[in-house]
Structure formats: structure tokens, C-alpha cells
Image (cartoon, rainbow, N blue to C red):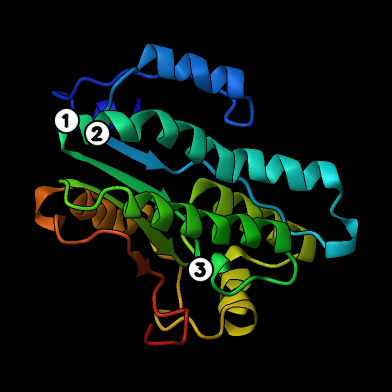
């Protein structure tokens, strides 16, 4: 609905699915059998100490964050190769490069995404199909806003204070010292799925505000 309101002339259709459920993903594929661009953006996160994360939670995180993209790519990539054009993007996270100690299960799934994307890109050699990963840093998503608001309420502070503390203590290497907007991430993804990005393939590309403190 937000996209339809923003761009009235576009044709928007939707399909509700639980991405941890293979049967529902199969139903989604049946409803949309062929696509030119696949963006694997579904993801869940939660802060939890390692010793408290159950096997069931580990499995659930991998079902949602990793296997959803695996299942969709397994169907759509061969069709893109047949047409000799397509784009697959995995939205990973800087947490997949710098595993947070309070979200090891989340960070590990994001590392796995990077591996899957690179492996799939190897299968596109000599074609006009590309597979890339995007590595956002801390982004002002709806989930992040809820997390900050809940933390502010819990600590009796303003959301501005919580955000300032977050970048001082949790993400001190972030160079922009703020959350990226979803529009900033989306603009980068829009470039990657365009014909202009035909030479970008098999890459893990950052839009992390300089959080990862390495050149490569």
C-alpha cells in the first residue's frame, strides 16, 4: 500500500506468506512463477545471550533468514539463466561480518547469506544474470524504531538519548553516527538491480555508514 501510494501508476500485487514455512513459500512461487528481480529481504533479529538461545530458535532463524532466500533462489535462478537476464540480491548485514555477541544466531545467519550469494553468483558465469549481497549497517527500519522505543521506555530515557548511546557504545566505529534511512539502502539496491550495475556480480557491497573498519 505504501508503494502504491508513493507511485500511483505502478502495478502492485501482494502475497502474504510465512517465510519460515516451505509450504507457504511454495504457494508464493506458484502465484508468481517467474520474476526478473528477486530481493531476499525478509529477516528477523533479537538480542539474546548465547547460552539462552535454544535449538528451536537457531533453526527458526535459519529457516527465515537463510532458507527463505535459498528456496526462492533455487526456483528463480534457473529461470533467469534461461532468459539470460536477472538480478538476485541478498540483504545481509554488517552483523554478518562483525558478529554481535548478543545476537550470535542472527549474525551467523547473515554470514551464511553472504556465502549463499557468492556461491550462486559462481553459477552465472558468462551470463547477464547477477547475484550480489548488500551489507547495511544500523538502519532506521520499523523493527529498529520499535527496539529503540522499547529500550527508551525501559530505561526512562528519550529515543534521542538511546540512539546517541547506541552509537557511542554499541556501534562506535560508525562514521555517520546515525541510523541510515531505508531510502538510502533502497537507492543503493535500485542501482544494483539496474542495467548500470551489470559489472557488479558476486560482491558483498556495503551501505553501512563506515561501521566495518576495514578497506575490504
Q: Say which residue appears at 38% left-offset and 49% top-offset.
A: 120
**Residue 64 in the image, given as x and y percentages of width and height:** 61, 39
| N-terminal label among 2 and 3 | 2
Q: Residue furthest right?
A: 51
154 on left or right of 88: right
Say whether residue 15 is visible. Answer: no
Residue 200 is drawn in which quadrant? bottom left
Q: Which residue is mark 3?
A: 94
Q: Say which residue appears at 17% left-offset and 46% top-offset.
A: 127
Residue 158 is drawn in which quadrant? bottom right
Q: Which residue is mark 1?
A: 83
Which of 17/185 is in front?
17
Which of 144/21 is in front?
21
Count all numbered tags in the image, as a single digit: 3
Q: Which residue is mark 2?
A: 80
Marks 1/2: CA–CA distance: 5 Å
Q: In this rendering, is residue 207 above or below 25? A: below
Amino acid at each position: 500500500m505504501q508503494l502504491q501510494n508513493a507511485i500511483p501508476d505502478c502495478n502492485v500485487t501482494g502475497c502474504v506468506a510465512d517465510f519460515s514455512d516451505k509450504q507457504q513459500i511454495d504457494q508464493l512461487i506458484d502465484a508468481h512463477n517467474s520474476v526478473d528481480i528477486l530481493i531476499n529481504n525478509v529477516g528477523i533479529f533479537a538480542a539474546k545471550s548465547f547460552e539462552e538461545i535454544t535449538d528451536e530458535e537457531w533453526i527458526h532463524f535459519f529457516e527465515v533468514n537463510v532458507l527463505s532466500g535459498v528456496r526462492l533462489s533455487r526456483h528463480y535462478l534457473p529461470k533467469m539463466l534461461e532468459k539470460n537476464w536477472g538480478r538476485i540480491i541478498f540483504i545481509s548485514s554488517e552483523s554478518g561480518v562483525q558478529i554481535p555477541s548478543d545476537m550470535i544466531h542472527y549474525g551467523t545467519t547473515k554470514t551464511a547469506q553472504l556465502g549463499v550469494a557468492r556461491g550462486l553468483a559462481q553459477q552465472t558465469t558468462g551470463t547477464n544474470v547477477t547475484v550480489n549481497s548488500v551489507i547495511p549497517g544500523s538502519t532506521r527500519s520499523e523493527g529498529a524504531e520499535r527496539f529503540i522505543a522499547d529500550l527508551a521506555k525501559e530505561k526512562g530515557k528519550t529515543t534521542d538519548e538511546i540512539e546517541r548511546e547506541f552509537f557511542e557504545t554499541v556501534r562506535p566505529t560508525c562514521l555517520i553516527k546515525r541510523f541510515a534511512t531505508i531510502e538510502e539502502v533502497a537507492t543503493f539496491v535500485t542501482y544494483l538491480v539496474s542495467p548500470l550495475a551489470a559489472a557488479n556480480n558476486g560482491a558483498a557491497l556495503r551501505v553501512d555508514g563506515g561501521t566495518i573498519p576495514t578497506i575490504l
